[in-house]
């Protein structure tokens, strides 16, 4: 098959849940003899927006389109982009794929599935997060509370802009928007162009001020339902989308696959007395690393260590800086930065217990399944899709989101009785798909769509 896979980024210039999944799936598809072309967004402030970068490597072609919103003037440009639409249409005409698999189009354009349909190319989509129903992506409002979504009373305009559209100054509104979608370097540039935030420049009314979010939601829904199969990785995500305007019968739960070198191989038991705790993920507030640090530092036990892996250059950078400042007097804590996908299993060899303290609802969690598959128990907040794979006192422990005292009690209990870990049964009751099994399932979906 000739497959065009669309994502919001692709290694080695972008590492995140969707990017790593796309990377693993593409390599598995190529191994199985399929021809794959990747179309993705690229962030590069040394290049002009919409510059196209073509890469060919190991039977794979990647088309990267630079987009950093360097000329951002309108909110709708964050989800509709004529130039990216045109580039995508040209790519389809040139490569003539048999099928398009959409995995994300943040910083691309929500109209891409509509373009594929217009060109008579069948498509499927995997929704990895809440971007189509939440411009802030995580269904967490600006006050830090869970949002039910736009069809269940969520107030999108004040959440995204901090005020109703049409209020405040033009410069303030653009800076607030830029904070959601750009880097610090660009925001500094924007401040210089606009003058400092808070300028008395008269308000320029947004052309879609009244209906901008209604229009956004309707466009995403129309585009996504144009695809022939709508996939989500967890039951939790199915509930969120079905309660926010998407027909329940169209949403299929297809768990993602985990890349495991040898499924039967478990990591060697730790013969050291030290219990090695770890966090893997971006150092951003919604991942709850501050909750983990407070809990860990509440447990005064020299037989515990905590290693934190993940990017610390994501906004707000002050969060990562504060984490390091908070923990600098505790020699048991180490910050190790990010690691490449091919290093992941070497990283797991140094972990006895993975902790996922998210304060926003996870849509799946690859790292939880990777750890469990290798015999590593997981402590996680009881939020989002995490309880679908982590079962309290079975293959790990669950605690109330944001409650560092509850997490500290679990850590203290393990420190006082390390034998608890050996009694846990990993991976646990939930079926964890291997990448090979998942790829076979996806290929079957491709085949069914193509003969539809």
Image: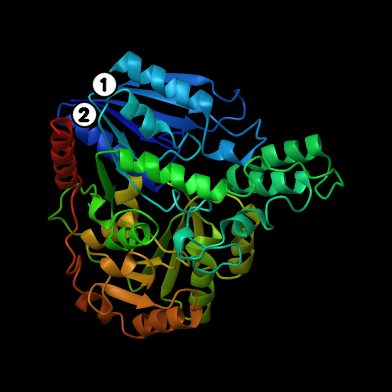
Q: Is residue 237 visible?
A: yes
Q: CA distance from mark 1 to mark 2?
A: 8 Å
Is 112 situated above or below 136? above
Q: Give the camera-side residue of 243 and 139.
A: 243
Label 2 element class: helix
* First-in-chain label (1 vs 2): 2
Is 395 situated above or below 165? below
Q: Give the camera-side residue of 273 and 212.
A: 212
Provide the residue designation for mark 1.
Answer: 59
Q: Residue 390: x, y in percent? A: 28, 69
Q: Residue 196: x, y in percent? A: 83, 45
- Please report contact status of discs 1 and 2: CB closer than 8 Å, yes or no: yes
Quarter of the image where one finds residue 321: bottom right
Quarter of the image where one finds residue 329: bottom right
Label 1 element class: loop
Q: Residue 281: x, y in percent? A: 44, 55
Quarter of the image for the N terminus: give it. top left
Say whether residue 441 is left or right of residue 171. left
> At x 35% / y 71%, what residue is drawn?
379
Provide the residue designation for mark 2.
Answer: 30
Is 244 situated above or below 393? above
Say whether residue 171 is left or right of residue 370. right
């Amino acid at each position: 098959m000739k497959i065009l896979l669309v994502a919001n980024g692709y290694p080695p210039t972008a590492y995140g849940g969707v990017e790593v999944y796309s990377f693993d799936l593409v390599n598995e598809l190529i191994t199985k003899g399929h021809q794959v072309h990747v179309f993705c967004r690229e962030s590069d402030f040394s290049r002009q927006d919409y510059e196209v970068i073509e890469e060919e490597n190991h039977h794979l072609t990647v088309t990267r389109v630079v987009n950093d919103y360097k000329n951002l003037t309108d909110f709708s440009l964050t989800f509709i982009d004529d130039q990216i639409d045109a580039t995508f249409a040209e790519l389809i005409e040139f490569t003539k794929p048999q099928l398009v698999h959409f995995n994300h189009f943040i910083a691309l354009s929500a109209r891409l599935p509509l373009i594929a349909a217009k060109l008579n190319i069948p498509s499927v989509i995997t929704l990895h997060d809440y971007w189509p129903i939440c411009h802030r992506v995580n269904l967490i409002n600006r006050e830090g509370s869970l949002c039910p979504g736009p069809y269940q009373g969520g107030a999108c305009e004040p959440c995204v802009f901090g005020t109703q559209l049409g209020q405040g100054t033009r410069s303030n509104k653009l800076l607030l928007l830029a904070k959601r979608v750009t880097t610090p370097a660009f925001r500094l540039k924007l401040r210089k162009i606009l003058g400092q935030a808070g300028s008395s420049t008269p308000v320029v009314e947004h052309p879609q001020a009244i209906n901008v979010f209604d229009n956004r939601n309707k466009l995403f829904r129309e585009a996504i339902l144009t695809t022939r199969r709508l996939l989500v990785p967890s039951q939790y995500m199915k509930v969120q989308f079905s309660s926010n305007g998407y027909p329940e019968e169209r949403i299929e739960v297809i768990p993602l696959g985990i890349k495991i070198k040898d499924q039967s191989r478990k990591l060697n038991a730790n013969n050291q007395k030290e219990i090695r705790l770890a966090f893997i993920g971006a150092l951003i507030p919604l991942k709850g690393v501050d909750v983990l640090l407070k809990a860990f530092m509440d447990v005064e036990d020299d037989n515990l260590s905590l290693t934190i892996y993940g990017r610390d250059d994501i906004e707000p950078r002050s969060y990562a800086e504060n984490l390091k400042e908070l923990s600098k007097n505790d020699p048991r804590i180490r910050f190790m930065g990010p690691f490449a996908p091919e290093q992941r299993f070497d990283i797991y060899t140094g972990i006895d217990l993975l902790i996922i303290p998210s304060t926003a609802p996870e849509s799946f969690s690859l790292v939880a399944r990777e750890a469990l598959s290798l015999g590593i128990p997981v402590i996680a907040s009881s939020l989002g899709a995490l309880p679908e794979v982590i079962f309290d006192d079975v293959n790990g422990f669950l605690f109330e989101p944001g409650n560092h005292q509850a997490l500290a009690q679990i850590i203290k209990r393990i420190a006082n009785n390390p034998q608890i870990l050996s009694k846990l049964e990993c991976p646990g009751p939930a079926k964890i798909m291997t990448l090979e099994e998942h790829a076979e399932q996806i290929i079957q979906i491709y085949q069914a769509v193509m003969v539809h």
